[in-house]
Amino acid sequence: MDQLKAMEIFVEVARQRSFSAAGKQLGISRALVSKLIMQLEAELGTRLLHRSTREVSLTESGHAYLEPCSASVEQARLARLAISQSASELAGGLRVQAPSSFGSEWLADAIARFALRHPQLRASLHVDDNLLDPFKHGFDLSIRVGGIPDSRGLQMRTLAPCHGILCASPDYLAQFGTPVHPTELLQHRCLHFSHLTTGASWRFTRTVGGHTEQISVDVTPSFSSNNGKVLHQAALRGAGIVYDTTFLAWRDLLNGHLVPVLSDWELPLNNLTALYPSTRKVAPKIRALIDFLVDEYQPEPAWDKALRERS
């Protein structure tokens, strides 16, 4: 008996709660699924599954065996993937989608350097601030801020933190003053990113003396856009206080073209995430790019490190 194959089948049957569904997923017959499960049970000397006409369920022994079995199967899968990836050059098309601001500011350079390492790849980067369905639009990998509302069929991996920051030009603050409390934003011109999941409600948190204070301010935007770079440029022109991100604002914060506002308050933390098809075998080129991006941006992305070292 191929014990590893039988273990893979057991994990799939436990997931699907069905011999037939597991066989369909694995591309083998129901009869072979049943045969290998029985051989595995005989090898272990215990019954792993209850069978009925309607459903398959785990026995007590099955529950105890599932977690270590799943871990062994996953380790074997990763080992096979590592061998196949090292044995052959990454090749073929690789379609990536990302928000326009992060895509142009950071991701384009990273993908260009990744492609130079793998000349057989045909990489493409589509920048778009709409939440496009990666399956429907044929992307191998989608980079998002905070993932997407419905991520069924997708796996998600965190690439980097995405810190929000309020800032404005020195000229704007000289003319209109600097707010010292979030409620004072109601008297200011606010530049709003229209894809915020909280709408035009800006949320703030601070901790003073062990006490945490939270407040939401429903701003009335004087200017809004679905593109972060548009808002950033408007802030540089003195158009108002912008709800920005550190990956976009860091350089202008360092050179003084923008000034932090309400810096003793924190905005909600998001993450830049990689979303990719939830399949048992992720393509080596997708896995390699994700690993490359994780190495690029962790444990601390360059933009946040620059701001931390200046502070």
Image (cartoon, rainbow, N blue to C red):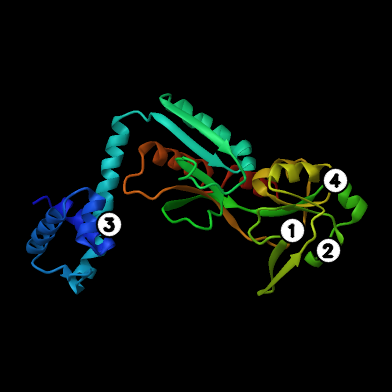
Distance from disc 3 to disc 4, alpha carbons, whole Å, reads 55 Å
- The amino acid marked with disc number 3 is Ala
The CA span between labels 4 and 2 is 17 Å
Earlier sequence position, callout 1 versus callout 4: 4
Please identify the quarter of the rendering in which residue 105 is found.
Answer: top right
Q: Secondary structure at mark 2?
A: helix
Identify the element where label 1 is drawn.
Answer: loop
Q: Nearer the viewer, residue 271 or 261?
A: 271
Separation (CA) of disc 1 from disc 4: 19 Å
Q: Which residue is mark 2?
A: 186
Tell whether 228 sits left or right of 88: right
**First-in-chain label (4 vs 2):** 2
Earlier in the chain: of badge 3 and badge 2, it is 3
* Residue 218: mark: none
- Do labels 3 and 2 touch, CB within 8 Å? no
The residue type indicated by label 2 comes to Leu
Query: Closer to the camera: disc 1 or disc 2?
Result: 2
The reply to whether dot 3 and dot 4 touch (C-beta < 8 Å) is no
The numbered mark, 1 or 2, whose residue comes first in the sequence reads 2
| Residue highlighted by disc 3 | 71
Residue tagged 4: 238
Q: Amino acid at mark 1?
A: Ser
